[in-house]
Structure formats: structure tokens, C-alpha cells
Image: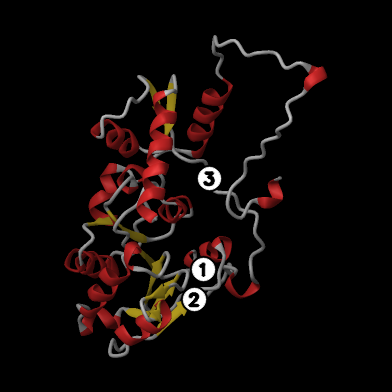
């Protein structure tokens, strides 16, 4: 069952943490959560943000940002993430219903940029179209872009990205908005606030409710250009990871007998990076 799988995953991570002499975490949130659950967390622990995402995909011509691109006459609101409730889809749809006629005069259209998923007896596309049929704005759903092309799309002028997730850890959607100077709004959940400089929290973060999100959209329609940048520089992040990986330790490793080599080879990669093998 799903519950059993989640239990085994947590047990596995908890055991691994208890056997570790030191630990590296992406956000303070991870450490605080483990301590609140009475995990045996290593006393030597470090929090280091992820490095800049790999940019190895081919960019489609139809979404490539043009240097002399003419800005749209209004702001395009772009929901960015999987098109599902967990990513805040319903919160965003309800916030759209609160838009006034004056707000709509400043909006060129609404785009839903993310993976189409099954929602009960329907799917995201059908659900969105039904929920926005009386909105009075142009609505577009894009679900066939990979990450590289999605990032190109949100880099365009007069775009305000909305990331209203209900649950998050340290999401690359927010990370990439920050390092690419994309105008955005994000919910203040999980490790998201840790990615953003404190002085910009009030302008780009919101409580994941329709009322608070609408209030921030209304404000940003008149103050769109707020680009806080990542809380830490890429150079500092890379240096921290190099120090962590290359640091010396006093543990003795058993020398491998070349005449009796191990019969197991381990290759570690992750989703959509099979070519790195």
C-alpha cells in the first residue's frame, strides 16, 4: 500500500541519518523537521543550497526568447508547476475569480504551464477550461514543454509567474525564477522562504489562500518588476559543495583486493539524466 511504502521510505532515511557522522541538507526546514520527530541527527550538519540546474536540453524555436521581442500589452499570469491540487491549482483558480474589471484590463491572458494529470473522472486541461470559461480572459494550457523550454517561456517580457504550492521542499521552479530574474509570486511553504532574501519576502511570498494570492496579484500587476535574486550566490554554493565533498576525514577504508574485485558496480544518476551514465 501507499502508506506502507511511505513508512518504509521514512524508516530507511531515518536509519541512514542515525548512522551518519555528518549531514548535508538543502534547507533548514529538513533539519528542523527531523529534530521535531526526534531523529538522531548528526551533530555536524551543514545546510547548502542546490547548485544551478543542469541546462542540457535543446530549446524549441517557438519558445526561444527573442532579444527584440515586443512586450505584450498586458501582464501574462503563468501558473508554473504540475496542474494538480497539491501544486495550488485550486487556490490559483479561486484567486482568478476575484479579479476585478480593472485588474483584467492589465492582464493579457492566463497560461497554465505544467503537466496534465488525471483528476478523478477528468483531467487538468478539461478541469481548467471548465473553471475559467466565464473568466473573461484568454486562457492557454501548455503541457508538452520540458524544463528547458518551460524556463524559456517564463523568461519572456511582461510575465508574472505564480507558484502557489501547498507543500514543497526546495523547489527548482522557484530556484530558476530567482536565478533567471523572472518576476514571480510563490507560497510561503516549506523551504521556499529560505531561497529568497528576507527583504523581499513581503513582495513575492503569500499565504496559500485565494484571498492572499489575489491580494499579491493585484499588487504586482502595478509593481511587476521585483526580481530579488537567489539568497546565496552560485559561486558561494559551488565552493561550499566542493569543500564538503573534498574535505579530509580520518576514517580508514579497507583496501580492495585487486585479485578479487567487487562484483557490484554502482551508477547513480537521476530522472532525465540517463545520458550522464
Query: Extreme right residue here?
Result: 259
Residue at 19%, 77% in the rendered image = 98
- Identify the residue under disc 1: 153
User: On the picture, is 21 further left or further right than 204?
Assistant: right
Q: Which quarter of the rendering shows the N terminus?
A: bottom left
Disc 2 or disc 3, which is closer to the eye? 2
Residue 206 in sight from this viewpoint: yes
Which quadrant of the view contains residue 148? bottom right
Check residue 142 in the rendering and tell me which mark sits there, or answer none: 2
**Can see residue 163?**
no
Q: Earlier in the sequence, mark 1 or mark 2?
A: 2
For marks 1 and 2, give the CA distance: 10 Å
Q: Crowding near pointer 3: few (<14 within 10 Å), some, many (20+)?
A: some
Viewer-proximal residue among 73 and 25: 25
| In the rendered image, the vertical position of residue 260 relative to residue 233, given as above or below | above
Question: Which mark, residue 52?
Answer: 3
Q: Which badge, 2 or 3, is on the more N-terminal residue?
A: 3
Amino acid at each position: 500500500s501507499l502508506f506502507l511504502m511511505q513508512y518504509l521510505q521514512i524508516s530507511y532515511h531515518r536509519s541512514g541519518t542515525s548512522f551518519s557522522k555528518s549531514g548535508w541538507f538543502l534547507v533548514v526546514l529538513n533539519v528542523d523537521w527531523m529534530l521535531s520527530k526526534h531523529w538522531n541527527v548528526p551533530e555536524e550538519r551543514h545546510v547548502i543550497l542546490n547548485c544551478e540546474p543542469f541546462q542540457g536540453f535543446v530549446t524549441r524555436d517557438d519558445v526561444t526568447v527573442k532579444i527584440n521581442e515586443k512586450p505584450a500589452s498586458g501582464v501574462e499570469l503563468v501558473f508554473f508547476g504540475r496542474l494538480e491540487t497539491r501544486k495550488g491549482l485550486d487556490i490559483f483558480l479561486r484567486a482568478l475569480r476575484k479579479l476585478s474589471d480593472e485588474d483584467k484590463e492589465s492582464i493579457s491572458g492566463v497560461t497554465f504551464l505544467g503537466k496534465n494529470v488525471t483528476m478523478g473522472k477528468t483531467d487538468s486541461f478539461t478541469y481548467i477550461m471548465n473553471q475559467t470559461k466565464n473568466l473573461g480572459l484568454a486562457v492557454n494550457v501548455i503541457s508538452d514543454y520540458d524544463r528547458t523550454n518551460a524556463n524559456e517561456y517564463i523568461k519572456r517580457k511582461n510575465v508574472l509567474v505564480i507558484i502557489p504550492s501547498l507543500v514543497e521542499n526546495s523547489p527548482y521552479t522557484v530556484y530558476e525564477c530567482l536565478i533567471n530574474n523572472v518576476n514571480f509570486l510563490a507560497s510561503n511553504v516549506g523551504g521556499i522562504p529560505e531561497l529568497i532574501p528576507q527583504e523581499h519576502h513581503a513582495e513575492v511570498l503569500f499565504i496559500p489562500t485565494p484571498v492572499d494570492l489575489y491580494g499579491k496579484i493585484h499588487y504586482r500587476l502595478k509593481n511587476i518588476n521585483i526580481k530579488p535574486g537567489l539568497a546565496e550566490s552560485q559561486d558561494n554554493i559551488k565552493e561550499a559543495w566542493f569543500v564538503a565533498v573534498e574535505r579530509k576525514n580520518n576514517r580508514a577504508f579497507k583496501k580492495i583486493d585487486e585479485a578479487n574485485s567487487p562484483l557490484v558496480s554502482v551508477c547513480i544518476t537521476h530522472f532525465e539524466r540517463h545520458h550522464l551514465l
